[in-house]
Image (cartoon, rainbow, N blue to C red):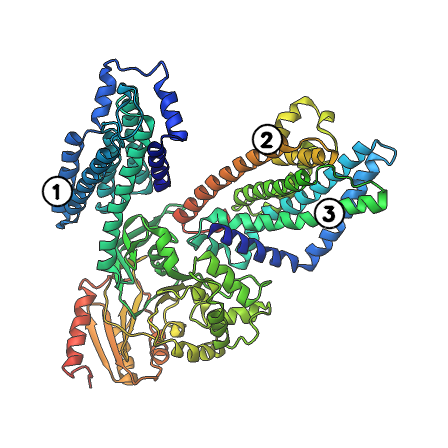
Amino acid sequence: MSIVVFVVLTVSVLVAAGPGLALDKWLAALPGLHTKNSVLAKLLAVIGQRAYSAPVLLVVAVLLAWRRRIWRPITLALIGLLSLNVIVGAMKLIIARPSPRTGNWLPFAGGTDFPSGHTSNTVLTWGLVAWLLLAFSRPVPTLTRQRIAYGLVAVASVVVGGASLYLRTHWISDIVAGWAVGFLILVGVTRLQNVATWRARLDRIEGLAGVVRRFDHRVSIEALRGVSFSVEPGELFGLLGPERRGQDDDDQDADHAAPADRGSARVLGHDVVADAREVRRRIGYVFGGDRGLYERLSALDNLRYFAELYGVPGARAEAADRVELLELVGLNRPREASGSRATRAACGSGCTSPAGCCTTPRSCSSTSRRIGIDPVGARELRAPIAGLRRQPARRSCSPRTTCSRPTSCATGSRSSPTAHRGDGHAGRAQAWRRRRNVLEVEVFGAAEPRSHRARVARRHGRSVEDADQAQLLVVPAEPGVEVTRPCSACLAGDTPARPGRHPRADPRGRLRRAGRRRREGDHVKP
Amino acid sequence: VTLRLLGVGWWLQLKIRSRSAFDGFLGVLYPMFFATTSSSSTGRAAHPTALVAAAVGASVMGVWSATSTTASSALQRERRQGTLELLVAAPTPFPLLVVPITLSMATIGLYSLLATLLWGRFVFGIPIRIDDPAGFTVAVLVTVLAIALMGFLEAVASVRYRSAWALGTAFELPVWLVCGFLVPLSALPGWVRPISWLLPPTWGVSAVKDSALGLSPWVDIAMCAATAAVYGLVGTALSGVLLDSARARATLALS
């Protein structure tokens, strides 16, 4: 939009005919606008002077850089100021339009008024100040504060433009073009930050840092209390625990289905609050159950519809791929409307909704035990999922019951250890990670640690380590051998949801120690 | 991209709606009922202009009825199917997902419009004479779009209410009267007129009547489009508020 305004006005000035110039002449002829010295107007115009705004911007950038221990705020501020000077300065010299006080509105007549430096500077510098404060503040400011900050910048821009018009230092087209140029440079600078962030965090699928989620509807519940974890590429990450322990809230926070009250969450390098739409474009979120599709539409139409909704590029061209996907899970007639078979088809890619599978997401989250697949369905799904193991997609899920239905997530995983800290509504959850042929289970707050350990160890003969109230079970497995279900059966006999204290030690440390022992060949306890 | 999304959404939603046998049966029955009621109450001896006005009013009545009752419970149906969460979680703006749904309902109403006119022609002998075909076509399309936008607002406004379907039914009959579908606006009390001016179908049905009778419909079409745009904007703002509220409470469940 800004580009359009800018191009239209520039062309209007250059060809000396157009709606912009007509408005210029009409506004300049208004009797209310004069060249008297108005103290108020001059004071307001000061907002747009670089001599005052640029130091403020640099001070803010330096403070943020010092506080966050990064150079990026200063770099971005300097790039913004430099770009403004170069671009606006060059345009002023090239177009050379006089000010309204001369009465000459034609370009190339020896002036330097197009575009307005005051308005472009106001938009850029004050916009950058607001953006830097919002982008580099932690915790992430609320949406209301963001709106207020950007609203103030908009008001300042309008005020400066109005003052310039009143003082007849600029034509209205100069002012609008100044806004457009400033806005364009501002957008460009913010995009640079996005690129930097993207490069740095692209390979981290999900990351939650100190997320707090509170619900104050009817009763006050703190569902998440300082939860932090990260999921790396290729990793299958599961949050397991009893009902209502906050696993769903973790996933919802990560996917911006429900934003956190405090802390930050990122998915594939995008902040779930600031870039909510980009996050949603990249994830496949499965809400669970055998619903989530239109039963009166064929499976293919369901996929087509959700492909459009989720902005899958080349949706039509990929129709053939989707047919293959449906055939992969045994749906031979995808054009027939049938709820049950379509559900099965959707389940086939590890997701139970068309939205989850048609986007080919790099990250796929699913919640709820309702996805829980019956034994026959689970067996049928394992084959196609095993076929998908070599694909680089990453999947994370959080079945809500402890170990009863982990089969949907216990496949296709490979990656490095990650950390899980904090509480999910008191935090008696298990964090499951499956690495290359190794299943690791952290069990918190088991009722009888010793007997539990003995049972599991006897059954699988693998490493079990105590750490306060938690045990870390490490089960190496041969490729293709199912170990999750036997482990689940063993652990189901305990009461992992028993309230208790949480381990104070960082689980990452334990994982590192476990990894070191494995490397040293000392991971099997007698 | 947006047009494509709207087009695909509209077409697939139309597919969904056209596959319901019960809705199809009602869709066939209702226009006949409307045409019969309207033509009978006007009387065969009435002036031809009054007969055409009655037929046109009854036909737009079908569009409104097809939209109002179903739009109010549209999002409830999405919730029952488990697709509401998917729509909300999609990266596409929510209004662009709901408008095709209500537009498909209004499109189904287009059949009602045609069937009503034909029923009146062949059963009651009301001549179908359209003096300004271009104006008539534009007026019908704008009216359908306007009713779809009204349905959009209705759908969004009733998403949190368990008895949303009743809300739609409650709106159905008053709009028949207030918008001049059944009786001319001049026959209504003066205090009703400002209310009817706020409703896009008032302008829409007036435009359709004028174009059928050879009068200029363009002012009415413009007013219909303008009021419909206001409904669309209000619906968009309301959907933003409701979604923010749902995210804050982490649920799309009924209140």
Give the quadrant of residue A441: bottom left
- For mark 2, name the chain: B
Q: Which dot marks residue B198?
A: 2
The residue carrying mark 3 is B114
Q: Residue at x 25, y 13 (%)?
A: A36
Q: Secondary structure at mark 1?
A: helix
**How far apart are labels 1 and 2 at the CA level?**
55 Å
Q: Secondary structure at mark 2?
A: loop
- Give A47 or A458, whichever is nearer the viewer: A47
Residues indicated by labels 3 and 1 sit on the same polypeptide chain: no
Residue A500 image position (x, y, % from top left): 27, 62
Residue B255 image position (x, y, % from top left): 50, 46
- Mark before the other along the chain sequence, 2 or 3: 3
Above or below B44: residue A66: below
User: In the image, is A343 to the left or to the right of A487?
Assistant: right
Q: Quadrant of the C terminus of chain A?
A: bottom left
Would residue A450 be seen by someone viewing this image from the given angle? no
